[in-house]
Image (cartoon, rainbow, N blue to C red):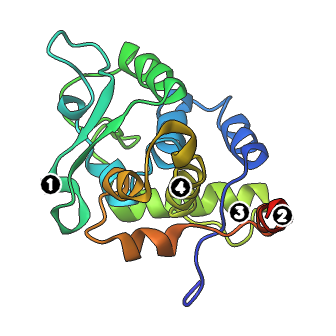
C-alpha cells in the first residue's frame, strides 16, 4: 500500500474481526491484539513490546490506564492511555490464563511476538475477512479519527488526541484523521 493510508475500521468491521477470532485457541490473546490497536491506538511495535508491568497496577489488577513507555514507542513517544472498557475486559480475560510477567502478547511458542509478526497477523486476518486496504495501522487510524471526531464532546482538543497518539507534532496527528463527507455536508448545511 505505498502512498496510501490504511483504511479505517468501522464498528461493523471491528465486530467481524472479533467474531473471526472468537473460536480460536488463542481467542483471548487475539482479542487483545485487535483492541490494543482499535481502542488504544497502539502501533504494531507497541503491541508486540507491551509488557504486563505497563498494564497492571500495584495490586496486580488491570489498571485504568496503559502506560506505554518511551522504550517501546516510536521516537520515544511514550504516553498514558486511558483504558477502554472493552480492552480492559479483554486484558482481564487474557490475564486469567497467562503469566503476568513479561510480554502481554505472546507467540504460540510462549515468547514475545515481533512487530513484523503483529503486522503479518493483521494482514492474515484482514485477508481472511476480505477487507482490502486494511493493515496493522487501520486500528490506530480508526482510534485517532474517532478521538478527533469526539474530542469536542468531551472537552478535549486535537492536542489531547496528539498526546494519546504519541505524536511529536499536531501535523502528524492531522494526517491520520480520516475525513467524513456526510459530516462535512451536515456541517455546511448547519451554517
Residue at the location (56% across, 30% down)?
A: 27
Q: Which mark is residue 125?
A: none
Instruction: Tell me the tag on residue 148.
Output: 4
Q: Of discs 2 and 3, which sits in the foreground?
A: 2
Check disc 2: other Cα within 10 Å, few if <14, some if 14-19, many if 20+: few
Mark 2 lies on residue? 182
Disc with the residue nearer the chain's start (4 vs 1): 1
> Label 2 vs label 3: CA separation?
28 Å
* Residue for point 36% across, 59% down: 162
To which residue does mark 1 refer?
A: 70
**Residue 46: x percent and y percent?**
31, 53
Asked if residue 5 can be seen in this view, the reply is yes
What SS does tag 3 mark? helix
For the residues labelled 4 and 2, the Cα–Cα distance comes to 16 Å
Residue at figure coordinates x 23%, y 58% from the top left: 73
Depth-wise, is mark 1 or mark 3 nearer the camera? 1
Label 3 and label 4: CA atoms lie apart by 28 Å
Residue in front for this viewpoint, 178 or 69: 178
Query: Disc 1 to disc 3, how far (Cα)?
Result: 32 Å
Amino acid at each position: 500500500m505505498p502512498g496510501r493510508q490504511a483504511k479505517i475500521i468501522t464498528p461493523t468491521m471491528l465486530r467481524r474481526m472479533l467474531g473471526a477470532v472468537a473460536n480460536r485457541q488463542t481467542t483471548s490473546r487475539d482479542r487483545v491484539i485487535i483492541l490494543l490497536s482499535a481502542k488504544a491506538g497502539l502501533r504494531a511495535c507497541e503491541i508486540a513490546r507491551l509488557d504486563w508491568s505497563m498494564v497492571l497496577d500495584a495490586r496486580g489488577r488491570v489498571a485504568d490506564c496503559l502506560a506505554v513507555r518511551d522504550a517501546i514507542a516510536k521516537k520515544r513517544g511514550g504516553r498514558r492511555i486511558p483504558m477502554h472498557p472493552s480492552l480492559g475486559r479483554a486484558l482481564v480475560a487474557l490475564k486469567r490464563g497467562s503469566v503476568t510477567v513479561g510480554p502481554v502478547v505472546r507467540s504460540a511458542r510462549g515468547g514475545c511476538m515481533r512487530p513484523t509478526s503483529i503486522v503479518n497477523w493483521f494482514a492474515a486476518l484482514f485477508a481472511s475477512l476480505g477487507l482490502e486496504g486494511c493493515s496493522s495501522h487501520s486500528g490506530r487510524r480508526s482510534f485517532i479519527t474517532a478521538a478527533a471526531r469526539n474530542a469536542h464532546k468531551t472537552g478535549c482538543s486535537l492536542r489531547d488526541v496528539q498526546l494519546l497518539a504519541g505524536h511529536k507534532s499536531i501535523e502528524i496527528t492531522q494526517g491520520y484523521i480520516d475525513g467524513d463527507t456526510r459530516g462535512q455536508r451536515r456541517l455546511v448545511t448547519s451554517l
